[in-house]
Structure formats: structure tokens, C-alpha cells
Image (cartoon, helix red, strand yellow):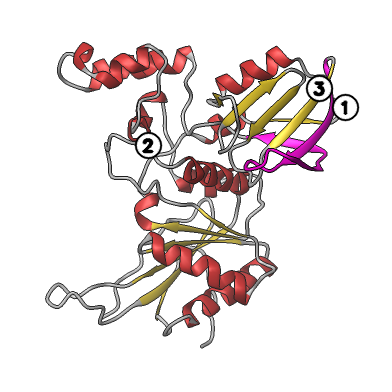
Amino acid sequence: MDLPLLTAGKRFTLPRPPLSADALLLAQLAMREKAAGRATAMFTADAGDAQRLIDEIAFFAPELRCALFPDWETLPYDSFSPHQDLISERLATLWRISQKEADVVLVPATTALYRLAPPAFLAGYTFHFKAKQKLEESKLKAQLTLAGYSHVTQVVSPGEYAVRGGLIDLFPMGSLVPFRVDLFDDEIDTIRTFDPDTQRSLYPVPEVRLLPGREFPMDDDARGRFRSRWRELLEGDPTKSRIYKDMGNGVATAGIEYYLPLFFDETATVFDYLAPTPPWCFTATWSPRSSISGRTPTSATAWCAATPSAPRCRPKRCS
């Protein structure tokens, strides 16, 4: 099947190829767009389709830098928070988009509907440090706490850190491995990865990037803004709400992620992260279901080329 020649603001709809052929077609499209200096954003019907496509596209075109923006995998206003690994992957993907480190970004359609923290939050709460750099232990602990990291006795999952004398163990969000920082007075002597199961140090690394520990801030200003907006927008006595009282005490209640808009004056969407990196090619894949039988009679893949100033189009359903 020949790939359509994309132009800004134009929409193309094609029958969806069978089995894994859609991933091959999308991989070819992404390779062509990469050669033209464009990245590709793909929106899928559900999270399972996005995971399948990222695995298969990586097989067909291993030279493409693919990133998945996963769903929280929780229901709105559930009394538990998304898994830390999911939050870590979401933050890492947003950072890769902002740094132009992704050729293909896959986003489930439902995930794209939720509001996100503005790009300025991610930029302002991300910091780096490297070996032989001056570093005050108290200052680092304050930065980690401000960024939303949890102080624990033993680091095993993303978003945690521990201090033992001159050693600081931390597991940055968006990282696959934790790091052990060995301080010599007020200078970083070495930085090594370590195994969270055995706690044994592994290999040295030159530097560490620390993303925020959460998708929202928890400093005094942010908590005050949250409580003010709660009183302004929600009915009832706020003192009877456990979430409201916990926020006053500096506690991030389980499920607080769905109240993210209350932390910011303005929120963003995934398109706000994509748009500053021109140009992008947007694709959408879906499987419309029959309302009578529940089966999938037809499927489609649609492409829409986009630039920062071009309108974004919704793909039509195939008949």
C-alpha cells in the first residue's frame, strides 16, 4: 500500500491492514517523516493497542526512537493513586517530547483527554547533577522533598531516596535503575547504579537527571492554591473533606491526581507538549464497533499532517 503524501491541515483515511501490517505501515510512515525532519504522534483507541503498536513498530523499525504516554490505569476519583512506575513513564515521555528525543509518540485516546501540568512545571522541577560537582547534602534533600520524592530507609521503586552517612540512594522518576551518590565532604565523588533487590553497587555513570516525583507540585504555594480553588469551585463544607484536610497537612491523598487542575492557574494537554516541537504528523487508529453485535466490522487508519499554526482534524469513520 502506498503511503499518502501528507500536507498540513489535510486528512487521509485508509482501510486498516490486517494483523500486524498496520504497525508496518505506521513504521514506514514514521521513517519517512523522520527523514523529512518531522516526528509522528499516534493516537490509538485504547491502551492495549498503543502497547501493541510500540512493540511492533520497534520490531519493524528499530532505529526509531519510540515513546509511550501511558494511561493512569485507574478510574476517575478512585481512592488509590496510579502505580509509581506509570507516573515515572509518563514524566519520562513528557521530558523526551520536550527535549526532542522521540521520533514516535503513542498516546491512547482516553489518555489524551486528561489535563496535564504545564510544560513550565516539568522544566522548573527538573534538575541535574554530575560527578565532581559541589553538592550540599541538606540542599539536595530539600530539593528532593520539594520535587515530591519520599524519604525511605531502603530505595526500591521510583520516587524514593535514602540517606546513609555520605551515601545518598535515589530512584529518579523516568529512570530504569536507581543511583547511589557517594559524597566526599561537599563534593560528589562517584555516582553508580545499584540493584534495588540486592542493594549492590553496579557501574558508574557521569550524571543523573531528576524529574519531579509527581505530576503536580506540593510546595506551600501549590497547596494554598489547591485549597483556595477547592473552596471556590466545589460545594459543601471543605472541612468535612478528607482530601482538603490532608492537603492542608501536606499529605498527597491517594487519588489526588484527578484533582490536578486545582494545583495550577492554567493546565495543559499532551498537544501543548507536542506543539512546540514543529512539525508533527498526527495519526489515529481505531476499531469502530457495531452497536448491534459488538463486533468490529471495519477499522481505519487516518493521517493528519500538522504544523503549529495548522488546524487539527478529527478522522472520519470508515463506512
How many numbered marks, from 0 up?
A: 3
- Describe the element under mark 2 as helix, strand or loop: loop
Q: Residue at x 49, y 16 (%)?
A: 219
For residue 60, which quarter of the picture? bottom right
Q: Is residue 226 left or right of residue 105?
A: left
Circle 2 residue: 81
The secondary element bearing badge 1 is classed as loop
Q: Position of residue 188 (x, y in %)?
A: 83, 25
Q: Is residue 87 left or right of residue 186?
A: left
User: Within the magenta stretch, is there residue 194?
Assistant: yes
Residue 312 in which image quadrant: bottom left
| Residue 132, numbered label | 1
Query: Picture quarter containing residue 88?
Result: top right
Mark 1 burial class by Cα count in 10 Å: few <14, some 14-19, many 20+:
some
**Which residue is rendered at x = 61% and y = 23% of the image?**
144
Q: Nearer the viewer, residue 168 or 15?
A: 168
Residue at 22%, 11% in the rendered image: 239
Q: Where's residue 76, x and y in %?
A: 27, 41
Q: What number is the disc on residue 183?
A: 3
Q: Which residues are magenta?
A: 186-210
Is residue 275 visible to us here?
no
Tell me whether circle 2 and circle 3 mark residues in contact (CB < 8 Å). Answer: no
Q: Is residue 178 visible?
A: yes
When the figure is inspected, residue 44 is found, relative to residue 18, above or below; the finding is above
Q: Residue furthest front?
A: 198
Residues under numbered marks 1 and 2 in contact, where contact means CB atoms less than 8 Å apart:
no
Whole-number angstrom distance, CA of label 2 to CA of label 3? 34 Å
Residue type of the residue flagged with mark 1: Lys
Label 1 to label 2: alpha-carbon separation? 37 Å
